[in-house]
Image (tube, coloured by chain):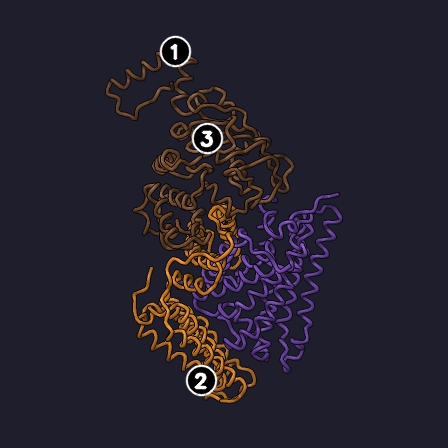
């Protein structure tokens, strides 16, 4: 499945990877409000330009349990906070706690979305071809590429096993003990089935000269420009400098 | 010493990464169990191939998990650091021959079961009396409920390990339990600052209840995360280690021997 | 067999024992396969058939360790002097499961077939020529743009075969290549094997328990039992040999029929006449070939 083409889609995969890493670094590293809010703004604009708003939804949904947990635990149980906003039974919500909770939530969303933008605009194959072109060895390319292609197949298989357990009334919803018992028929076949292929795959790789020395031939170069190279360095160095400056107290973001 | 990346290890790693992600996702999200089970593949690779392959399997698992559409997102990516450390340790256990079968019978077997149970209890007591917990709730210690829980789980785990050793007639259970528990403690210590600094001390899973309980008892953000980790991780990594042990013993000697650390996983011949 | 040592694939008194095993899985096998010839090896389970494939192709002991004695030559070079990627360019090997043999890391069949030539670092024009040549030889050029993970079993097995052919090995070792395929897949692969020996001049060693496939493709047949070749001969003569059954091999249907009739005291010539008679009388099923 290839994402629709757009300006952002057409950027070199490594450029997008560097931007995603820098965004994560700033979202987490620059404390206070400005780090996460700034990243969220940039990511939001990028997503709008790339036209991937709808695809971002699952990534946002995946953060919801975490955000709920962050909000509840920090708002009500923030250590040494005494500026009480309101009380629910024995628990007191504090202003300090709420501020910390909102900041942490924004960090999480900003991080998740920067990964989402990268994931949704970059076909895995392009990323791997580009990384190989930049010197990632054939082993690294194989491990990452094969893992990404194996996951959906194995997830499908795990789903089938869980379904068949449900059908045989081996509950996956019931009590803790029943769910634990459901684990053995899930994990056993899943793991042993996967491992049984490793031997044959090893032989097949060797039979196709996988362990030959030297560099592999690249079939299709991924376009890159001098401008993008400059952007990559700028973004990488800039984010590190920003991080160092805030950590060292040179600048204090709000 | 640091491990080998031959073609067989390279063929195993993607499978191990997929096992980590798919099983971890299913256990945490579909079955909603209060354990992670997302490091079976990492420990398997570490034990079969050495510390570096193990560490890389762990790190790549978490990064790819974060990136994968559909099951990605959440907080898993930054914990790649923890996963890497788990893989390093697993490689060490592989070198030390921890996962090698040690068939035993009679009094020898019962002695091993006793030793295994003792190791688990000892670790539980270490956690129980650890200075980072304190004993005074007013100074960041925990309430009595938490202590009863730790003690209860420690005893149950000790009995489970002793039972496993006797059931399999294999003294290695004691070693595996110790390796799992140590891995769990280290994982907790590595994870706590990540959770505290990046995610406000929680991870969005069922274990957040423990964090909340510890905060309620007066622990600060870091110590509440650490306390939760020291509670969950040794249990999770011990279970994971036993699963890996069972997987290894179900593979034939012929297959095991072909992996870089294979010789250390095969029962030693009696001279 | 007193084949010249120039045969692409030669084993001489080859013995092989797996690491950690006490017994020899191969115990003194000598055989050679000339260019354009197909040698089929049959035998019961555990006779050492898969081991024979690994040793003949040079994967054992190079990749799986173990103890090897005797001689295994690919294009005249001892396999013990070849590294796996060098052996791969002299002898291609095809396994049972079509899916585990694909690299699983590329989006198209074309790139899958180009995987081997890329690994040895060939220049792009050479890769293109070899990849398209391999696809053409197997008549699967139309599959080139397809996703390798969405092929039928037979198609995937042909793609796996094309992938080893792209390295242009002089010999091929096929380890039960159709055991996981349906009849249509078996037919496709069977035709491809015949064509490879005929058009590409490959020396082919095939291990297979489907005697109906062997009957169609093999020039010669050897019977493996307990790690030794215990019988060998021309394909037709071997397949009608009653001894096959005692060695754990099911003869093809026509040979079985002939034997049953012969046991009942009916002469072979009568059988042939009977079959011809059936053909004449509006027989709508596939033709039954009487053994020569």
Residue B21 tag number: none
- Image location of residue C46, percent across then percent down: 55, 33
Density class for disc 2 (Cα within 10 Å; few <14, some 14-19, many ≥20) is some
Same subunit, tags 1 and 2: no
Q: Which residue is mark 1?
A: C266
Q: Which residue is mark 3?
A: C40
The image quadrant of residue B236 is: bottom right
Density class for disc 1 (Cα within 10 Å; few <14, some 14-19, many ≥20) is few
Who is closer to the viewer here, C81 or C23?
C81
Question: Measured along the vertical axis of the image, is residue B240 above or below residue C67?
Answer: below
Chain A tint in image:
orange
The answer to whether any part of residue C259 appears in the image is yes
Same subunit, tags 1 and 3: yes
Chain B tint in image:
purple
- Local secondary structure at mark 1: loop
Mark 2 and mark 3 residues within 8 Å of each other at the beta carbon: no
Q: Which residue is mark 2?
A: A33
Q: Chain of mark 3?
A: C
The quarter in which the C terminus of chain C is drawn is top left
Density class for disc 3 (Cα within 10 Å; few <14, some 14-19, many ≥20) is many
Q: Chain of mark 2?
A: A
Question: Measured along the vertical axis of the image, is residue B135 above or below residue C115?
Answer: below
The residue positioned 51% from the left and 85% from the top of the image is A245
Q: Chain of mark 1?
A: C
C-alpha separation, residue under disc 2 versus residue under disc 3: 73 Å
The residue positioned 54% from the left and 38% from the top of the image is C55
- Local secondary structure at mark 3: strand
Image side of residue B5 versus residue C263, left or right: right
Mark 1 and mark 2 residues within 8 Å of each other at the beta carbon: no
Chain corresponding to brown in the figure: C
- Mark 1 or mark 3, which is nearer to you? 3
């Amino acid at each position: 499945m290839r994402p629709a083409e757009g300006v952002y889609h057409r950027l070199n995969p490594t450029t997008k990877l560097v931007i995603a890493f820098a965004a994560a670094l700033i979202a987490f590293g620059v404390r206070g409000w400005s780090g996460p809010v700034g990243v969220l703004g940039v990511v939001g604009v990028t997503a709008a330009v790339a036209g991937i708003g709808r695809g971002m939804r699952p990534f946002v949904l995946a953060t919801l349990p975490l955000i709920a947990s962050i909000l509840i635990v920090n708002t009500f149980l923030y250590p040494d906070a005494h500026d009480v906003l309101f009380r629910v039974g024995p628990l007191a919500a504090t202003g300090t706690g709420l501020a910390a909770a909102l900041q942490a939530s924004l960090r999480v969303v900003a991080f998740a979305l920067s990964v989402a933008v990268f994931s949704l605009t970059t076909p895995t194959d392009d990323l791997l071809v580009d990384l190989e072109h930049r010197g990632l060895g054939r082993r690294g390319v194989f491990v990452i590429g094969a893992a990404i292609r194996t996951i959906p197949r194995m997830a499908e298989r795990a789903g089938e096993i869980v379904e068949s357990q449900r059908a045989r009334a081996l509950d996956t919803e019931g009590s803790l003990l029943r769910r634990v018992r459901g684990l053995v028929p899930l994990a056993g076949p899943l793991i042993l089935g996967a491992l049984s292929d490793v031997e044959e795959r090893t032989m097949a790789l060797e039979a196709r000269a996988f362990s030959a020395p030297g560099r592999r031939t690249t079939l299709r170069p991924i376009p890159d420009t001098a401008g993008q190279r400059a952007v990559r360095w700028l973004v990488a160095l800039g984010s590190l400098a920003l991080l160092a400056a805030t950590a060292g107290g040179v600048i204090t973001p709000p | 010493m640091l491990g080998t990346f031959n073609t067989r290890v390279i063929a195993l790693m993607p499978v191990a990464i997929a096992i980590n992600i798919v099983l971890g996702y299913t256990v945490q999200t579909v079955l909603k169990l209060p354990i992670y089970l997302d490091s079976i593949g990492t420990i398997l690779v570490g034990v079969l191939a050495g510390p570096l392959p193990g560490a890389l399997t762990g790190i790549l698992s978490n990064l790819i998990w974060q990136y994968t559409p559909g099951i990605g997102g959440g907080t898993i990516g930054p914990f790649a650091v923890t996963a890497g450390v788990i893989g390093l340790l697993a490689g060490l256990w592989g070198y030390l021959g921890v996962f090698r079968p040690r068939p035993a019978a009679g009094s020898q077997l019962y002695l091993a079961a006793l030793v295994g149970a003792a190791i688990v209890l000892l670790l539980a007591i270490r956690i129980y009396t650890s200075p980072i917990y304190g004993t005074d709730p007013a100074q960041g210690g925990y309430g009595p409920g938490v202590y009863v829980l730790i003690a209860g789980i420690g005893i149950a785990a000790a009995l489970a390990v002793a039972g496993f050793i006797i059931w399999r007639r294999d003294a290695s259970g004691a070693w595996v339990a110790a390796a799992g528990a140590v891995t769990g403690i280290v994982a907790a210590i590595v994870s706590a600052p990540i959770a505290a600094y990046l995610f406000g001390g929680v991870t969005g899973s069922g274990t957040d209840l423990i964090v909340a309980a510890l905060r309620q008892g007066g622990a600060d953000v870091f110590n509440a995360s650490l306390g939760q980790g020291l509670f969950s991780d040794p249990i999770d990594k011990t279970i994971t280690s036993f699963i890996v042990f069972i997987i290894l013993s179900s593979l034939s000697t012929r297959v095991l021997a072909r992996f870089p650390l294979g010789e250390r996983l095969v029962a030693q011949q009696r001279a | 067999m007193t084949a010249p040592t120039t045969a692409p694939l030669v084993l001489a008194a080859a013995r092989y024992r797996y690491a950690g095993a006490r017994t020899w899985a191969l115990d003194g096998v000598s055989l050679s396969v000339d260019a354009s010839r197909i040698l089929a090896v049959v035998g019961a389970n555990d006779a050492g058939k898969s081991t024979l494939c690994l040793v003949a192709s040079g994967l054992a002991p190079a990749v799986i360790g173990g103890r090897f004695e005797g001689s295994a030559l690919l294009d005249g070079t001892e396999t013990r002097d070849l590294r796996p990627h060098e052996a791969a360019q002299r002898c291609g090997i095809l396994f049972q499961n079509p899916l585990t043999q694909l690299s699983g890391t590329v989006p198209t069949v074309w790139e899958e077939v180009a995987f081997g030539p890329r690994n040895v670092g060939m220049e792009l024009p050479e890769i293109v020529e070899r990849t398209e040549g391999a696809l053409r030889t197997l008549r699967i050029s139309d599959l080139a743009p397809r996703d390798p993970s969405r092929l039928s079993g037979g198609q995937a097995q042909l793609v796996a075969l094309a992938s080893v052919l792209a390295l242009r090995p002089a010999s091929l070792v096929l380890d039960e290549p159709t055991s996981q395929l349906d009849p249509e897949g078996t037919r496709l692969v069977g035709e491809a094997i015949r064509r490879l020996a005929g058009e590409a001049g490959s020396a082919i060693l095939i291990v297979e328990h489907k005697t109906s496939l062997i009957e169609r493709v093999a020039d010669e047949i050897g019977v493996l039992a307990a790690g030794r070749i215990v019988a060998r001969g021309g394909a037709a003569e071997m397949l009608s040999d009653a001894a096959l059954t005692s060695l754990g091999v099911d003869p093809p249907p026509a040979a079985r029929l002939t034997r049953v009739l012969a046991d009942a005291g009916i002469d072979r010539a009568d059988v042939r006449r009977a079959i011809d008679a059936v053909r004449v009388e509006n027989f709508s099923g596939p033709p039954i070939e009487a053994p020569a």
